[in-house]
Image (cartoon, rainbow, N blue to C red):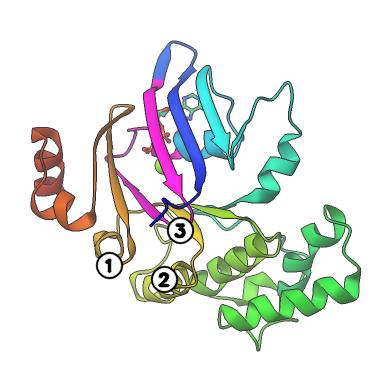
């Protein structure tokens, strides 16, 4: 069987904020339809890595290759790259003065130049898909956190990205709302979406993850299949981390 397509390849990625060296020689590959779950303590660099992959932060050195193209800010239109790599944040950042559907159609119309009709048709389909088929016309303030996050997922999907990055998408939610968002993400994964997910939900990592990447202090300590990494971690660091959270 041929190896599946590489969607993201990161080599020797380094990122500092002033004197603070946050990402240290990160190497990582994400193949088509992979779900890669990034775990690690707070401050280990997970968000910074995702933000570098989406060019919200600019690396200091190393290479980031998206779908076979090495992306550099000098030579690439980063907005075009971001269309391929969608992102969902912990805080959903919905436009409060737009309806749910308005939030979802904004970028397809403004950025991709879709007609309103076309954007609405696709947006409704996405909202149906994330279980919000009865919420097109309401404002975000009337929604639960879980519903808002599902709108944010639909909004990211509306750009038809090839890869989706999730940065702790359930961390801001009341516990009873976490499941509905994880279910939506799992459905996406089952459909074959390529995903990189930062989460503390180890059940999700185990069940949905193809790979788990454990980061500590700006480095990747260990990468493995969920069952290997959780049940038979190789590195002492990983063992210590797992015993601190499980
Ligand atoms: P994680 O998501 O794993 O909690 P982050 O990537 O958010 O970790 O942060 C890694 C380190 O980088 C932390 O020490 C954090 O304080 C620092 N950091 C993150 N963003 C910035 C920034 N914009 N400016 C300065 N320091 C930052
Ligand atoms: Mg973070």
Q: Is residue 211 left or right of residue 138?
A: left
Residue 50 vs residue 175, the one in the foreground: 50
Residue to which mark 2 is pinned = 186
Residue to which mark 3 is pinned = 169
Q: Residue 93: which quarter of the image?
A: bottom right
Cα–Cα span, label 1 and label 2: 9 Å
Does 230 appear above or below 192? above
Residue 192 vs residue 25, the one in the foreground: 192
| Label 1 SS | helix
Residue to which mark 1 is pinned = 207
| Label 2 SS | helix
Q: Residue 64: which quarter of the image?
A: top right
Cα–Cα span, label 3 and label 2: 13 Å
Residue at the front extreme, as displayed:
1
Question: Where the N terminus falls, by quadrant?
Answer: bottom left
Would you call the spot at circle 3 few (<14 residues within 10 Å), some (14-19), or many (20 or more)? many
| Label 3 SS | loop
Find ligand 2 in the image and state its quadrant: top left
Residue 92 vs residue 199, the one in the foreground: 199
Sequence-first tag of 3 and 1: 3
Q: Residue at x 47, y 55 (%)?
A: 195
**x and y percent of residue 204 in the render?**
31, 64
Cα–Cα span, label 3 and label 1: 17 Å
Question: Are discs 3 and 2 less than 8 Å apart at CB?
Answer: no
Would you call the spot at circle 2 few (<14 residues within 10 Å), some (14-19), or many (20 or more)? some
Q: Is residue 193 magenta?
A: no
**x and y percent of residue 134 in the render?**
65, 89
What residue range appears in magenta? 22-48
């Amino acid at each position: 069987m041929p190896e599946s397509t590489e969607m993201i390849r990161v080599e020797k990625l380094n990122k500092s904020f002033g004197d603070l060296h946050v990402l240290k020689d990160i190497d990582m590959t994400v193949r088509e339809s992979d779900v890669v779950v990034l775990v690690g303590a707070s401050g280990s660099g997970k968000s910074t890595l995702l933000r570098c992959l989406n060019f919200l932060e600019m690396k200091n050195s190393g290479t980031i290759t998206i779908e076979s193209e090495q992306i550099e800010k000098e030579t690439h239109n980063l907005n075009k790259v971001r269309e391929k790599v969608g992102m969902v944040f912990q805080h959903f950042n919905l436009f409060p003065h737009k309806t749910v559907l308005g939030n979802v159609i904004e970028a397809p119309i403004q950025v991709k130049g879709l007609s309103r009709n076309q954007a609405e048709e696709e947006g409704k389909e996405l909202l149906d898909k994330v279980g919000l088929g009865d919420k097109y016309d309401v404002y975000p303030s009337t929604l639960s956190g879980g519903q808002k996050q599902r709108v944010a997922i639909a909004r990211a999907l509306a750009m038809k990205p090839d890869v989706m990055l999730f940065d702790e998408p359930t961390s801001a939610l009341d516990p009873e709302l976490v499941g509905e968002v994880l279910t939506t993400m799992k459905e996406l994964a089952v459909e074959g979406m390529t995903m990189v997910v930062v989460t503390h939900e180890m059940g999700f990592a185990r069940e949905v993850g193809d790979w788990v990447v454990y980061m500590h202090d700006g480095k990747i300590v260990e990468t493995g299949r969920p069952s290997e990494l959780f049940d038979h971690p190789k590195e002492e660091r990983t063992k210590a981390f797992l015993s601190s959270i499980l």
